[in-house]
Image (spheres, helix red, strand yellow):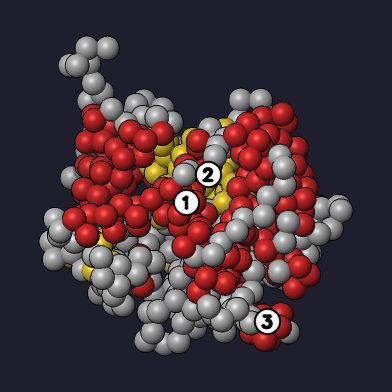
Amino acid sequence: MYATDYPKTFPENFLWGGATAASQIEGAWNIDGKKLSGAECIKGAKKGNINSTLDDATLRSITEAVNSDSEKEYPKRHGNDFYHHYKEDIRLLADMGFKAFRISIAWSRIFPNGDELTPNEKGLEFYDRVFDEMRKYNIEPVVTLSHYEMPIGLTLKYNGWASRQAISDFTRYTETVFRRYKDKVKYWMTFNEINTGTTGFHATGALEDGLKTENEKLQLRYQALHYQFVASSLATKQLHEIIPGAKMGCMLARMQTYPATCNPADVVMAQKVDRLNLFFTDVQVCGEYPEYMNRYFAEHNITIKMLANDQQILKKYPVDYLSLSYYMSSATTAKEVNDLTAEATGNQHAVRNKYLKTTPWGWQIDPQGLRIALNTLWDRYRTPLFVVENGMGSYDKISEDGKVHDDYRISYLRAHIEQMKEAVKDGVQLMGYLTWAPIDLVSFSTSQMSKRYGFVYVDLDDDGNGTLERMPKDSFYWYKKVIATNGENLD
């Protein structure tokens, strides 16, 4: 290829669409045999509070949740009622011209307690209906197998992914859905934003009662993540055997970071932070633990328990593509800080980047960071990339004319698509772009409806009150035009 032969725009088969998660949209938490997931056992943030309560779980709080029927206290139990609105919602996505729609399968809808030997047929039938509805409009399903939705029964039985037993229960579930939907789903991914397991319960399903030091918690979390790595590789093996030609992806919450200054100490710290983010894709794409983690594990007294063939499994069954979420970047300093930026990014060395604006939730808006992230990942892995989450949570209001004028969202998405196009010109092989989230849903981090992302407004408030009526926002019609022109018309 000559230097001048570079792509000018997105490929013809580019997968435009949007992404959601079962625990944030479905509702129907106790219908047709379903039982609770970990996500549905976390209370919503109190009124006026935008801080997350995700990893505050204890045995006491989980027991209280299991014994409660409250949807108001636990908003993910009602979601936006996609379970009963899926036909209407998919029709709206089709009207926008969606090429792909990412959902997750609720593990506890298929195996309610997580450890049953036979699946719940009514749960399987629900996703049959959803996939059939997508097929009617030629929308490609992109399915996440585990989007922070481990059955709470497995937390109570053996403390979630802290136990190796989770691998066999997970792979029983994955084999079941691969066989059931082998003619309906081509694109899969195992664990959503797997790197967030380093912060605790929401991604590991493991309670940390009795662990006093940060190193003790890190030991449990990284051990749980190792079991997820093995489970992901085994699921990839299953997929390739059951559905030849299907593709399995990993999913990284890409936390793009820059040195706060050109002080070498800040540069070194930024490199360390970046490696802790890329560690997960190093394992899942390259199939092995990178050497730099040896020092990190030693300094934090972490010892990963492995069976003799674990590393062989990781090497033999890497993923087929790398998917990522991208919302923000951060600037990293050698000093440890504690402010909103550090909390939002999970980087305790993160400081405010003075060159960037923020969302109402303190997330720094950095479209060029997406181009940098894509180039970084492509240069490192040379494997197809897929942006499966990007969006802006904001307080949307219905205007006097009865419409939602969300120009701020259009501006945010336009800027990110422009930078994504630059990355394609740079040579990045990009499969598609899925916004988070096309229809208003319950925020994962805060369980609030008021943190809205969608092109479609849902009449529901933080207390669960509303008609659930769906209404397109201005961004709905803008994104429809973007898709129709394959990203050429961004006005």
Q: Is residue 284 left or right of residue 340?
A: right
Is label 2 in a helix, a strand or a loop? loop
Q: Are marks 1 and 2 in contact (CB under 8 Å)?
A: yes
Check residue 181 in the rendering and tell me which mark sits there, or answer none. Answer: none
Nearer-N-terminus badge (3/1) = 3
Residue 21 vertical placement versus 485 (above, below): below
Horizontal relation, residue 67 to residue 26: left or right = right
Mark 2 highlights which residue? 289
Q: Tell me residue 292's x, y (percent).
A: 43, 48
Q: Residue 293 carries which label?
A: 1
Asked if marks 3 and 2 touch (Cβ < 8 Å), the reply is no
* Amino acid bearing label 2: Tyr
Q: Quadrant of residue 179?
A: top right
Furthest residue to the top?
A: 2
Residue 70 vertical placement versus 388 (above, below): below
Q: What is the crowding at mark 2: few (fewer than 14 residues within 10 Å), some, or many (at least 20)? A: some
Callout 1, which amino acid?
Answer: Met
Q: Mark 3 points at which residue?
A: 59
Q: Which of 231 and 415 is in front in this view?
A: 231
- Taking the spot 67% from the left edge, 55% from the top edge, the residue there is 305
- Secondary structure beneath dot 1 equals helix
**Which residue is rendered at x = 46% and y = 82% of the image?**
45
Work out how far the residue at label 1 is from the one at label 2, CA to CA, in angstroms. Answer: 7 Å
Quadrant that contains the C terminus:
top left
